[in-house]
Amino acid sequence: MAGLRFDLRDAPDGAAALRAEVRGFLAEHAENFTPEIRARSWMGFDRDFTRAVGAKGWIGMCWPREFGGAERSFLERNIVLEEMLAAGAPVGAHWIGDRQSGPLILRLGTEDQKRHFLPRIASGEYAFCIGLSEPDSGSDLASLRTKAEKVDGGWKLNGRKIWTTFGHLCDWMIALVRTSPAPEGGARHIGLSQVLVDLRAPGVSIRPIRDLVGEKGFNEITFDDVMLPEDALVGQEGAGWAQATSELAFERSGPDRYLSSHPLLEAAMTTLQQDGAAAPALGRQVARLWALRNMSVAVAGMLEDGQDPVRQAALVKDLGNDFEQALPNVVRDLIATEDMPEDMRRMHAYLTQIVPTFSLRGGTREIMRGIIARELGLR
Ligand SMILES: Cc1cc2nc3c(=O)[nH]c(=O)nc-3n(C[C@H](O)[C@H](O)[C@H](O)COP(=O)(O)OP(=O)(O)OC[C@H]3O[C@@H](n4cnc5c(N)ncnc54)[C@H](O)[C@@H]3O)c2cc1C
């Protein structure tokens, strides 16, 4: 059970000043955040906004300065993230690079990879996507079949990834692929590696897939004899499974796992502020939000201390997804859609349609609960 501790963290030094600075910056951009954009949260993709965030030093802000970072702490980064999400800012163009691709390259990349990629992620020039899922490999990821074969001068990539968020808009993917066969009768996660894929390379085809709302958010990406240079490998050949699963702690614990519907909660609080009967239900939501926030900050603290909080991250994701997924129904029980102000109604309509995806992306509810159960010794 020791592995499921969440130690409360104090705000870092200078927290109030940083929060005020982020709020000031967001206020300058707020006129561009329509209700539709705010409802999309980290699924809003806007390169110009991302470049402006990069210019402030708020992408890769924990990375060393020599690689374009600002050497700030994970807890300071958390402040920036939660302010961005609370405002409904369109952070999608840098979210993945800042959250997981960049940290992975920083931890395991070669010196050349760090020098090339990190400053370009930090400035907002490069957008990254995640290449894990395949048509027949989602939860059972180790069954993936995309293959990078060693050839003269590099690797030859063949296979298919699916559900790749923003693949059609991004520049690079870090893909988990098979680089050697799994041992006969042995563990399937042996022989997997992570590679950097330039999405504009010959042989890459990208087919957008419409999501529940009818928008092209994710994609199917096919690799047909795509040539990757030798230095496309990130980290150690064959160690891709361990690398990708520890990367998931970055993916699963952040405020993006409980703030996706936040602008709707704020709209409900504004609209219902004079309605005493709604106060207990809204209060319960805020209490849950606060507990989740403390847990997420605790995980940021563990990352800061160099720990690998995969299980805690799974718990934050599972509880956070329940919270953000339930919010449109909770709000609709308090105020009928026809009584909502127009902006709020538009936000509510979008979120009602899209929330089922929240507990799929980043690993499903059942998979999260399996991880947690294992930690509790229940399986
Ligand atoms: C909006 C969105 C964005 C996404 N973006 C990306 C992305 O950018 N990159 C990427 O690689 N992937 C992405 N995904 C894919 C996502 O990671 C997968 O959908 C997810 O891992 C589930 O895989 P699957 O869809 O193949 O479902 P399956 O794995 O087939 O699961 C189907 C159902 O069976 C359940 N199930 C499966 N195995 C078990 C088990 N062992 N025990 C109990 N229940 C089980 C699952 O929980 C689920 O309910 C995205 C998905 C969504 C919805």
Image: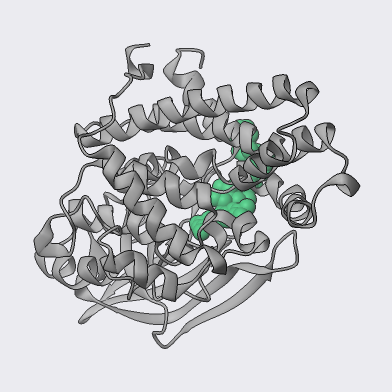
For this orientation, the residue located farthest to the bottom is 202
Is residue 254 visible to us here? Answer: yes
Residue drawn where x is 75% and y is 62% of the image: 213
Taking depth in this image into account, of 125 and 340 the one nearest to the observer is 340
Q: Residue 13, relative to residue 40: is it above or below?
A: above
Residue at image point 50% right, 59% down: 89
Quarter of the image where one finds residue 149: bottom left
Left or right of 305, for residue 334: right
Instruction: Name the residue rendered at 83%, 32% in the picture.
Output: 333
For the point 33% across and 57% down, which residue is it? Answer: 98
Splitting the image into 4 quarters, where does residue 74 fall?
Answer: top left
Give residue 236's position: percent from left, percent from top: 20, 54
Q: Position of residue 286 (x, y in %)?
A: 59, 27
Viewed as shown, does residue 370 lie left or right of 176?
Answer: right
Q: Residue 104's x, y, as percent? A: 27, 53
Please state, as top left, top right, bottom left or bottom right, where the N terminus lies in the image.
top left
Scheme of colours in the image: one colour
264 sits left or right of 33 in the view: right
| Of residues 229 and 282, the one drawn nearer to the viewer in this rendering | 282
- Kindly tell me whether residue 176 is visible in this rendering: no
Compared with 29, 4 (above or below) is above
Q: How many marks?
A: 0
285 over 113 or under it: above or below = above
